[in-house]
Structure formats: C-alpha cells, structure tokens
Image: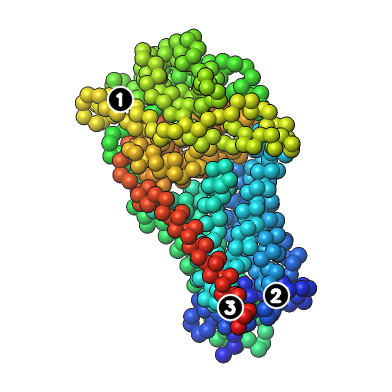
Amino acid sequence: MSHVSSTPIEEPSDSGSDPAPQHAPAEPAGRGPDASRTATAEPAGQAAPADRWASRPATLLLAVAAGAALWASFPDVGAWPLAFVGVALLFTALRREGRRAAGWNFLVGLVAGLTFWLPHIWWANFATDTVPWVALSVLETLFLAAFGALWTWARRWAWVRRHAVAQAAVFAVVFVAVEQWRSEIPFGGFPWGRLAWTVAGAPTGRAAWLGGTTLVSFLVAAAGVLLALAVGRLVRTPWRDAGTDAGRRARAAASAGAFVLAAGALVTGPLLLPLAHDPGTREVTDAEDPGHVGTVVDAGAATAQAGVLRAGAVQGNVSEPGEGSFANRAEVLNNHLAGTYAIADEQAAGAYGDDPGDAVDVVLWPENGSDLDPQTTPEVGAAIDDAATTVGAPILVGAQEFPDSGGRYNVALLWEPGEGVTQRYAKQHPAPFGEYIPIRGFVRLFSSQVDRVTTDMIPGTEPAVVDLPVDGAAIGRGTGPATVPMATVICFEVAYDEIIRDAVQRGAQVLVVPTNNASFGYTAESTQQLAMTRVQAITTGRAAVQVSTVGVSGVVAPDGTLVARTQLFTPDHLVADLPLRTELTPAVRAGYWPGWAVGAAAVVLVVGGVASAVRARRG
C-alpha cells in the first residue's frame, strides 16, 4: 500500500541547517479507511522528509499570515471565518521538529503574536502613547510565543504524532490553557484577544451557553487545526504523478473530506443547543441601521422568566475624543442629563405607550456618566435627582469616589428620585497601567505616561450586583414592590468571566455594562468590547445592555443577537424591553471548572510529551 511517511509535526529536524526544499505541507497519511492515523513516527532525533513549507523563512511568513488573519477576525474587520484560517496557519507554521524546535517555534509564536497584538490593541496607542502600547503588545505576545514552545513539547507523545484528531485536540487544549493563563496573570490578566470573542455572531459562539469562553475558544482552535490537516492532506498528495494509484487519491480525498466535515461539525454544531431565543427579535446587521430609532427595542421579551424590564440608556457623548475628552468639567454630566430628559419627553408624548406600565423602569448611564461625584457635589446631586423625578425612574449613574483614605473608586450608583444613592457597586478589577500603576517607579523609567494616572484606583470588594426596586405590576411580576438584581460590570470587567458569572450565580437577571470609551477615539476598542458583551449574554443566558459615554452602545438578547447599537461619538439614547431570566446556564453552573480542567490537561500533556521525548532519546 502506498503511503506518505511524514506527519505535519514530523517535519525537518531543527538540529542544524535548513532542509532542502521539496513539496508542500505534509499531512497524516491514511492507512486504509482510517484517516485519523498516520504512519509510524520516526525515531527521535531523525529528520523526517523535508518540504519548502517547513523551512525557517516559510514558517516565519506563515506566522505573519496567521497573525494578520487572527487580527482581521476581530472587530472592526470582523471577518470571523478568518479565526479558523489564522489558527490553521499558526498550526502549519509551528511544524519544525528536533531538539531545538521549541526555541524556533517560540520565535514563530513571537512573530505571529506581534503581527496580531500590535494592530489589535492599536487603541492603547491612541489612548496613551507608543511605549505603553508596545509594552502591552509584547507582554501578550510572549504568551503566544510560549504556546509555540509548549505545543512543540506536548506533541512529542507518540500517540499525538500518530493521530490527527489527537493533534487537533491537544493543540486546542494547550492553546486555550495559555489563553486562560494570560487572562489571569500578571496583575489579574488581560482577556482581550480570546478566540471566543471573534465568533459572537457566528454559530460557534453559541457554545458559550454550554462551556463559556473556554469551550468556544477550544472549538475555534480545534476546527482550525482540522482545516489545516485537510488542506495539507490534499496538497501533499501527488495528484499529477502517474505513479500515484487511484486508491491513494481516493483515500486522500476521503480523509480531507472527513477533516472538513469534522471542522464543520465543531463550527455549526452549537446551533443545536437550546439557547433562549425569541423569533420576534430583529437583528442589527448594518451599523448604519441601528435598529432603535423611534421605537422600544425588543431584546427577546418572549424568553422572560421573571418579567420584562423596560430600560432606557443614554449615550451623552463628548466634544473632544481622546485625551481631552473630560477636560471640560460637567460637560459629560450635562450631556447625560439632556439624554435623560429626551427619554422623559418621548415617554410623556406616548412614544413608548400610553399605559402607566409603559414607562421606563430605569435609566442607565455609562461609566463616568457624571464627571463629578453627586454624593459630594450637592448641585450635581440635585440635577440628577430632578432628571430622575422627571423621567419617573431611578438612574444608574457612573461616577468616581475619592475617599479620605486616598485613592479612588470607579462606581455605579443607583440614584432613586427623592432618595439619592440607595445602591452602589465599585469596580472590582481596575485596569492595570490604565486606572492604577503597579510598580510605578520602575515603569516610569520607560514612559512618563504613568504620571497621567495621578490617583490610583482601588478595587471594590462587593459582587457586581445592584438591586433595582421596581413596580411588580409594571414588569409583569404580580403586584406590589419587586426587586430586579442587575449585574453591573464596569467597562473592561466584561472580559472577565468570573466577575459576570459570580453576579449571575448571586441572582442577577440582566447584564448592564457601563463603559467609557472616549479616550480610545475612532478605534475598534468599543466594538471589540461589544463582541464580548454578546458572548457574555450567551454564556449567562441574560439580556445585556452596553452603554457607553461615546459609543458604541448596544442591546443584546439572551442568545447573543444584537438588536440595537449606536454610532461612535454621537449623542444618542435608546429604550429596550429586557427579558428577566433566572435559569442558570450550564456554563454558569460549571463555574471555574472548564478553565481549571483545560489548564491541568495542558500541564499533563506538556510534561508527558517532554517525558516521552526523554525516554525515546535514552532508548
């Protein structure tokens, strides 16, 4: 039987000079009908047949292509299928073998990471300066570089070499584990750039309901590897060679087809999951058609389990994007007061209905919606109280507190008309180097930008839940007073699974994401954040509102459908009916376990791979 003896990871040994170029990427060869097995692995240290795609220059070019594809899969480009292409290219780039392969693949991961991270968080350059942007990009890139080395070690187990399906699974496990680790360390981690965020509007994203961002990233990574295996299988087969028998061609086509079908199952299989879906919701697919003008947006009201909350959200805007956006004190406050009065005027005119129960139950302001603390500035408190009284509903106000003990808190304050602040949430996870400066003296050696943060933010200690008092009859929950627990995660906290999951486990029935994107200008930061809000809505089975000072604000149904959005740097407001839900999704019930499991599995795989290679070398 004719077969190819090399696999995609048994490529030229990195023990010295580059191999002589031959053909295209190698793939697992079929043994009969079983395309998931490859030929017997070659002895440790012996070079496998070479090809031009495994040369050092080629792997670096593939790394650049991988990083570019991954970048384009995220907003604002948002071409989510390129996430699978990017993973496939990265898998192909990390193919060199030999005793020094881990070092080379570290470099390959470094190149791919820089290609991805520098444009992905370009907004950091806009908001700060070149040095902080590059420093954060390099820090996150080091995790992808480390992944290149870890994957090289993990695949040295013989069973991984010999089974294509094992290669896809192990690659995905190690990749997602590294994602999880960089989401937690250093300084609390930075979950930006997770594969899961790319597929918020794709079928694969629905898997967040089952296993959160961990499962979604795993499916994207595994599907990308399977696509790489399929392409490599086809390219490696010498179709025009007269010496290639028809049986071998048929087996190559069949195995490639099996890989593609398996990848397709991973991508589209989540469509079968029983997410809370309302066929009546209208999805916004065009940024120029925001979906909310002159109407009350339906965020899947038919999926409600504990009534429907009518919420207004105000995007006040600022006059100057970027560093000077809050230079004019009280401008931001006045803009959000004006937006609240606009909702009150529409409500009085009957735009939302003529019955008393058609009024808004709460008005949501963004992070820093008031650039002055209403608790310490009487005239600000009076202005907010007048607006709340006029609209006839509490206002969730974003502000900052400066305690006498020093530091500052980033807070969401529930202001009830005639009563003032009755509920409070302080941001638990301030952004390092953005809202507080760790190791300030050391960092100042590299950039004076640290001095822009004159007062470090203090982390809050209470869960991200604000209890909203409502009229039970108004929300469809019997008569008399009722309470709606809202998860109020502030800005970047939307990327941290554990903060949102904890709030939902404590009873939150809807997600609110107040955020301030003014410093990031016309970059992709706010749309990247909106994608995270969509994934978290699916993960928790909760409707969500992202409300920004300057945009992009949006309303999301419990199944992740985007039903309304605003534009950047425009004053706007919207009103939405949000279904209140109490059921806990499997992802929420699972808690930390998916992340712990994938991290532990990665450690076992890497240690086992190293041990297997050592045993083979000694044998």
Disc number placed over residue 454 in the picture, else none: none
Say which residue label 3 marks.
Answer: 615
Image location of residue 559, percent across then percent down = 40, 45
Numbered disc in front, either 1 or 3: 3
Tell me the CA gap for discs 1 and 3.
67 Å
Q: Residues within 10 Å of mark 2 (few under 14, many from 20)?
A: many
246 left or right of 346 in image: right
- Amino acid on which the number 2 mark rests in the picture: Ser
Disc number placed over residue 470 in the picture, else none: 1
Numbered disc in front, either 2 or 1: 2
Q: Residues within 10 Å of mark 1 (few under 14, many from 20)?
A: some
Numbered disc in front, either 2 or 3: 3
Tell me the CA gap for discs 2 and 3.
18 Å
Q: Residues within 10 Å of mark 3 (few under 14, many from 20)?
A: few
Q: Residue visible at 60% across and 43% down? A: 76
Image location of residue 434, percent across then percent down = 61, 34
- Color encoding of the figure: rainbow
Residue 90 in view: no
Image location of residue 544, percent across then percent down = 42, 37
The quadrant in which the N terminus is found is bottom right
Say which residue label 2 marks.
Answer: 13
Tell me the CA gap for discs 2 and 1.
68 Å
Residue at the extreme left: 479
Q: Is residue 584 above or below residue 373?
A: below
- Amino acid on which the number 3 mark rests in the picture: Arg
Q: Residue visible at 42% across and 11% down? A: 386
Asked whether disc 2 touches disc 3, contact meaning CB atoms under 8 Å apart, the reply is no
Residue 402 in view: yes
